[in-house]
């Protein structure tokens, strides 16, 4: 059963990752959606942490404020990074032609 499960699950994972890669190449905004979901989840994990919850519950709206701040921070830094990469690529190739 273990071999059968692995034989079935590996092609499913490979097909799914290929599909996601093609979709993200075509629709770049999907990367930002995924990053936002991960940042929101990380913010909720921080708020629900046993060690941090004692300190964070004294802050009004911390349960929503921390995830929102993390999403804005992650998406903002991602956008800044994308602009820097694009500027670097344009500086290397100012005509816009591919250098093959």
Image (cartoon, rainbow, N blue to C red):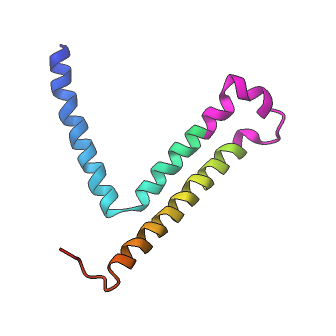
Residue 82 in picture, x, y percent from top left: 46, 64
Give the residue displayed 23% in from the left and 77% down from the top: 98
In the rendered image of this protein, does residue 96 appear above or below residue 69?
below
Residue situated furthest top in the rendering: 1
Residue 34 forms part of the magenta stretch: no
The residue nearer to you, when weighing 16 against 83, is 83
Give the residue displayed 79% in from the left and 30% down from the top: 55
The residue nearer to you, when weighing 44 against 52, is 52
Residue situated furthest front in the rendering: 92
Where on the picture, by quarter, is residue 54? top right
Residue 29 in picture, x, y percent from top left: 43, 61
Image-based side of 55 in relation to 10, left or right = right
Where on the picture, by quarter, is residue 16? top left
Give the residue displayed 18% in from the left and 13% down from the top: 1
In the rendered image of this protein, does residue 7 appear above or below residue 68?
above
Q: Main secondary structure of the magenta part?
A: helix
Residue 48 in picture, x, y percent from top left: 66, 29
In the rendered image of this protein, does residue 60 appear above or below residue 21?
above
Image-based side of 98 in relation to 47, left or right = left
Position of the C terminus by quadrant? bottom left
How many labels were placed on the picture? 0
Give the residue displayed 62% in from the left and 55% down from the top: 72
In the rendered image of this protein, does residue 44 appear above or below residue 90?
above
What is the span of residues highlighted in magenta in the rendered image? 43-64
Residue 70 in picture, x, y percent from top left: 62, 48
């Amino acid at each position: 059963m273990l071999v059968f499960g692995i034989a079935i699950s590996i092609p499913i994972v490979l097909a799914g990752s290929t599909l996601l890669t093609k979709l993200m190449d075509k629709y770049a905004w999907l990367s930002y959606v995924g990053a936002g979901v991960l940042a929101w989840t990380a913010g909720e994990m921080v708020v629900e942490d046993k060690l941090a919850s004692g300190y964070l519950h004294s802050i009004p709206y911390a349960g929503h404020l921390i995830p929102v701040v993390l999403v804005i921070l992650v998406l903002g830094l991602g956008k800044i990074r994308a602009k820097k990469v694009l500027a670097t690529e344009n500086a290397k190739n100012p005509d816009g032609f591919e250098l093959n």
